[in-house]
Image (cartoon, rainbow, N blue to C red):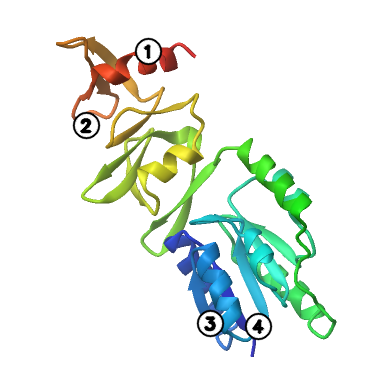
Amino acid sequence: MYKVLLLEDEKPAAEWLRQLILKFDPKISVLAILDSVSDASEWFQQNPAPDLVFMDIQLADGLSFEIFERVKVPCPVIFTTAYEEYAIKAFKVNSIDYLLKPIGYIELEAAFQKFGTRLHEVQPGPEVTSELLKKVKEMLQKQYKTRFVIKVGEHLKSIQVEEILFFYSFEKATYLCTADFKTYLIDYSLDRVSEMVDEHKFFRINRKYILNNQSIADIVIYSNSRLKIKLKKPDEEPIIVSRDKVAAFKEWLDL
């Protein structure tokens, strides 16, 4: 019976992956689901090595490659990522495979089959050098998230960033709104989202909203040198742009 460890900071994606693994083989033991570099590093120091690790490239507190700088990972790895295939090719390292989110059953099955054929071979963990880590960080810094994976009932759905009008917070949760005015809960804070999306296309207008430049229906000059933004979503309240944000907002509109 295989023992696997999951490193994933998006709860819907982690639960989806767990379900796919158990669908492939109900006898597989999922030892833990961890969401950060620090938690994963501590886990490897305190527990016997699993047979296999599914490792998201970007975790809550940094790149999963940083784990290899802190501790020895004496087992094979399958990387997962929301980034496009051309990017992940540069950091396959010695991993068995990589899976592009949202992960499908057929892709997972193929990865397990590849793992099975190498099960009796000596399979060291990936060799991650400081040079490789630097290269990966530079690569990811030049990219923005291209999709968000959200849970819809018992299913996962991939939403392209181009389809998103705005992100907003409500009662300590974060949501995105699509061009067809549907809203979905996501597992990120607005602070985190602002680091993931292209600043040329999205603007953090206040503590509650991050707007796509395609989300704006009208802009009205408001009192005290402020602006009022009406969004394309019909039932959304207008947003007041404070005076200290007006200059930056106008500059962003002019990009």
Mark 4 or 3: the one toward you: 4
Mark 4 — residue?
49
**Residue drawn at point x = 45 percent, y = 35 percent:** 163
Mark 1 — residue?
250
Q: Position of residue 250 (x, y in %)?
A: 37, 12
Residue 212 placement: quadrant = top left
139 over 119 or under it: above or below: above
The answer to whether residue 242 is visible is: yes
Q: Position of residue 64 (x, y in %)?
A: 61, 60
Q: Which mark is residue 236?
A: 2
Mark 3 or 2: the one toward you: 3
User: Nearer the N terminus, badge 3 or badge 2?
Assistant: 3
Mark 3 — residue?
31
Q: Quadrant of the N terminus?
A: bottom right
User: Nearer the N terminus, badge 2 or badge 4?
Assistant: 4
Residue 93 placement: quadrant = bottom right
